[in-house]
Amino acid sequence: AAGVIQSPRHLIKEKRETATLKCYPIPRHDTVYWYQQGPGQDPQFLISFYEKMQSDKGSIPDRFSAQQFSDYHSELNMSSLELGDSALYFCASSLAGADTQYFGPGTRLTVL
Amino acid sequence: QKEVEQDPGPLSVPEGAIVSLNCTYSNSAFQYFMWYRQYSRKGPELLMYTYSSGNKEDGRFTAQVDKSSKYISLFIRDSQPSDSATYLCAMSVSSGSARQLTFGSGTQLTVLP
């Protein structure tokens, strides 16, 4: 079965640079979530989208923005990167109102 | 204090043992409870999902929820070395079209052959 696709899988940036992470949900899933997982930590919810509209917002820094496109894929844009932004970034998808989320393999961002 | 507390581990057991993983929570609004398995440097994989108090069984895995005590557990029977991973409990509230998950901190399990 098709799963959530994330790209790139690994990304290395320097401080103050920008990064764009992409997420392609499972076909027919219309809801996308972004989570950040720091080293040795649990995933922290950043933001979610339903039908291309932001539906909920968590602990997402103002330097980050995201959107969902007409084909339901989503992009997380990160600017003025800081060392503390180094983490695994997961995207998850679900059907609207469904209780289960399916996670992608993650993008490992390293900020030097 | 975190909304979801999970026994931190790490936990090391011999192959064939019964494993018990536990989480407590403080937010009464949580209605949906999940267990995810995460291998090193991989995305969380959904193992079990339940929304009612009681037990739910799937193969070697049993999820138990006690809403009155705000306590959930995952039991793994006949544990295998391939079960070695970090196990995360996760919860969500019932409202809205998008339901963000709140995770426990994870329990690292090692099953020794």
Image (cartoon, coloured by chain):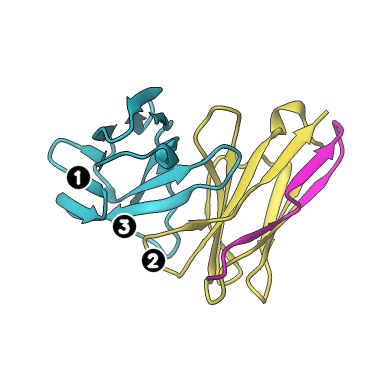
Chain colours: A yellow, B cyan
Q: Considering only order in the chain, which callout, 3 or 1, is on the residue closer to the N terminus? A: 1
Spot the residue most to the front: B113
Name the spot of residue A86 as percent of width and height, x first: 71, 33
Q: Is residue B53 left or right of residue A66?
A: left
Q: Which residue is mark 1?
A: B64
Q: Is residue B30 left or right of residue A50?
A: left
Q: Residues within 10 Å of mark 1 (few under 14, many from 20)?
A: many
- At label 1, the amino acid type is Gln
The mark closer to the camera, 1 or 2, is 1
Q: Which residue is mark 2?
A: A98
Name the spot of residue B13 as percent of width and height, x first: 33, 26
The residues bearing labels 2 and 3 have C-alpha atoms spaced at a distance of 10 Å
The reply to whether callout 1 and callout 3 are in contact (CB within 8 Å) is no
- At label 2, the amino acid type is Ala
- Label 1 marks a residue whose chain is B
The total of numbered circles placed on residues is 3
- At label 3, the amino acid type is Ser
Q: Secondary structure at mark 2?
A: loop
Position above or below: A82 against A66? above
User: Which is more toward the observer, B45 or B94?
Assistant: B45
Name the spot of residue A74 as percent of width and height, x first: 67, 62
The mark closer to the camera, 2 or 3, is 2
Q: Which residue is mark 3?
A: B94
Q: Quadrant of residue B4?
A: top left
Quarter the C terminus of chain A occupies: top right
Magenta region: A1-20
- Label 3 marks a residue whose chain is B
Q: Residue at x 24, y 40 (%)?
A: B75
